[in-house]
Amino acid sequence: MTIDIFPTLNLLARPGKTPPTLRFARTGTATRVDATGTLAAVAADGLRHDFVRTTGVYRGWRLEGARTNLVLNSLTPAGQNITIGAGTWTLSLVGGGTVTASGAMTGSATEAAPLTQTASAGTVTLALSGDVRGLQLESGAYATSIIPTAGAQVTRGVETARVDATDFALKADEGTLYVQCSTLGIGGLQTALELGDGSADNRIVLRFDPARAPQATIFSGGASQLSLTGSAVAADQTVRMALAYKAGSAAFCIDGGAVQTAAPAAIPAAASLWLGSEGTATDPLNGHVLHAAYFPRRLADADLQLLTR
């Protein structure tokens, strides 16, 4: 069995390649792991091609929200004392070493196991051992990529990536969205793909819900038309999901599994397709996108299963 309808927008992440129609922005320097396993800085507005440090496997485009790193000299870190406010904090690192926290936070972090704790206001003392190539302490319930710092704390801005409808053939009343992606996020919405007019009122979304379950939603004129949700997945687990839609008929499929259906009364007008966040630059993915596509037809349910295997 093959899918006979081709996408009019096909964004396939490949090392070092940026699609010419993709409009990408980010304030501040960020980091990625390159193909050699080196933690490398990427200047503002630079799309990040990320790899697994220990294996060299390509992970796709890393797309994240805003965070602030409280660690000084984070790419050449040393032990230090850091003042934090009350809240949830995450300590993470890149490298084969260990960082031990004491004071307002207690415990140890490794690259594979960041330390997340709800702490009272106070001072955190960090002690390093072994190979620590990058270090971060940030407010939040999960780790994001290391933000480069020197003698002061630094904020990385939210990343936005979009393709305007003038750059691909968009059918106003039907279509199919597909994305292959992963997220580290938990506790909020993490948007992988959105087709809409840039507002919260008119949009078709593929995302993860606060429990990290893949989800498809449609809003038209501010009213919910569809909400279909799968089962929660593990942090950083690659997921393939697709939503086929037209007025009165929609279907959602995750990883080739059972198809969920619904009957949206209306399909919203769209002006752009966003990757890694909503059109309002909210609910960032905090993960990776390997492939995203738009088909100008409502694909058959069986085609969705084939597409997402």
Image: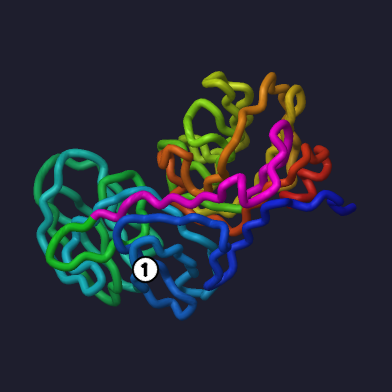
Whether residue 119 sits left or right of residue 282 in the image: it is left
| Residue pictured at 25% horizontal, 54% vertical | 155
Sort mark 1 into few (<14), some (14-19) or many (20+) by Cα contacts within 10 Å.
some
Q: Vertically, is 104 above or below 271?
A: below
269 or 239, nearer to the observer: 269
Which three-letter amino acid code belongs to the residue tagged 1?
Answer: Val
Residue 27 in the image: state x and y as whole percent: 32, 56
Q: Residue at x 42, y 71 (%)?
A: 33
**Residue drawn where x is 63% and y is 25% of the image:** 226
Q: Name the outermost residue toward the bottom.
A: 36
- Of residues 169 and 47, the one nearer the viewer is 169
Q: Residue 131 location in percent, x, y?
A: 29, 76
- On the image, the x and y values in percent for residue 210 come to 46, 35
- Quadrant of the rendered image containing residue 302: top right
Total numbered circles: 1
Q: Which residues are magenta?
A: 155-179
Is 11 left or right of 3, judged from the image as shown? Answer: left
Up/down of 190 relative to 228, above or below? below
Q: Eyeballing the image, is 279 above or below 23?
A: above
* Residue 249 sits in quarter: top right
Relative horizontal placement of residue 256, taking residue 102 as reference (left or right)? right
Residue 142 appears in the picture as rendered: yes
Disc 1 is placed on an element classified as: strand
Residue 236 pos. (x, y %): 50, 54
**Residue 188 covered by magenta stretch:** no
Q: Label 1: which residue?
A: 42
Q: Can the viewer see residue 215 in this picture?
A: no
* Residue found 45% across the figure and 72% down from its top: 53
